[in-house]
Amino acid sequence: DLNELDSLDRHIIDSCFTVYHAEVDDTSKAAALAFITNAIMYENWHVFLFAEEKGLNKLLLKKHTPEILEHLRKSLAQCYYYIGYFYYGDQSSFVYDIDSTYAFLFKSLRIYEEYNDSEGIRGVSNNIGSYYRKQGNIEEALKYYYRCLKIDEESGDKLKLSNSYNILGGVAQDQNEPQLAIEHYKNALKYGKEEGHKYYIASALTNLGNVYLEIFEKDSLKIADSSWLFMAEANYIEGLENFRAINHSFGKASGLMRLGNIEFIKQEYLKALSLYE
């Protein structure tokens, strides 16, 4: 409801609607609606999302050329995507409604499928997979994650391939399938290295280190076979080097913390403290 806006927001939205009504062609009107949505997104973004949805659906009642129709429909798909995110309630001010989340995400997905828009399909599928994963529905989550992977394989986008394998590795790790997780993370590392992207390389190395450490910690013969611990340490060190190369603050901090944990396990307490500091 537009009455929820404060005076500054009201002035901006009024200006946007002035532009909207002044435009003649529907593509420009859609652009104005998108601007309305984005103008104050972090203040009252749900108000603008629903305003954009209403405006786009009104425009779609008219006849259009195929090109303009596609543009408007994809704009609506993007709007549905963000409304789905709104209902998921990742922020405390949002209203959590998982049924509405899926309803709007699937509306978005159907439009992208209608136009065989692989980027749109991938983006929505990835979010659907993430929400299913958070809800504990791993079977459904994997269905959408593997759909993303297939799109990445077809496009040959190595960074997206690396990202998809990192996600699949995380799911396998959550499901207590360490060998499958290692396989996925090694694929993520492979594509990250082929692209020469240090963040993706560091992320895959860190994830591999985490799996190796988990295997070590579950091994009842830790002292007799510490190879998993050494592999974890080696991956953490290499991952940290890559995070340092791009000056990634969080990556550097988490890498030092993980290496400190390794030293603590080895009972090298002073080394651990120096890394924690």
Image: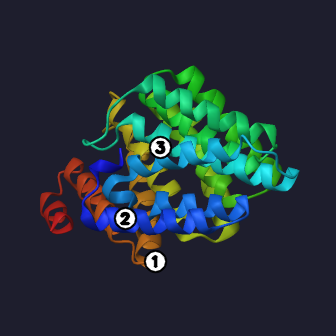
Q: Are marks 2 and 1 in contact (CB under 8 Å)?
A: yes
Report x, y in % for residue 39: 43, 65
Residue 32 figure quarter: bottom right
Q: Residues within 10 Å of mark 3 (few under 14, many from 20)?
A: some
Q: Which residue is mark 2?
A: 251
Q: Nearer the viewer, residue 193 or 157?
A: 157
The residue pinned by badge 1 equals: 246
Which of the numbered marks, if any, corresponds to residue 7?
none
Q: Residues within 10 Å of mark 1 (few under 14, many from 20)?
A: few
Indicate how the structure is coloured in the image: rainbow
Which callout, 3 or 1, points at the residue further toward the start of the chain? Answer: 3
Q: Quadrant of the N terminus?
A: top left
Foreground of the two, 226 or 144:
144
Whether 13 is drawn above or below 216: the answer is below
CA separation, marks 2 and 1?
A: 10 Å
Residue at the image point whose x is 23% and y is 47% from the top: 265
Query: Residue at horizontal 48%, vertical 32%?
Result: 131
Residue 37 seen in this snapshot: yes
> Which element carries disc 2, helix, strand or loop?
helix
What distance separates the C-alpha of mark 3 from that of mark 1?
Answer: 40 Å
Q: Quadrant of the C terminus?
A: bottom left
Residue type pointed to by label 2: Gly
Mark 2 residue crowding within 10 angstroms, few (<14) / some (14–19) / many (20+): many
Q: Amino acid at mark 3?
A: Phe
Q: Residue at x 47, y 61 (%)?
A: 38
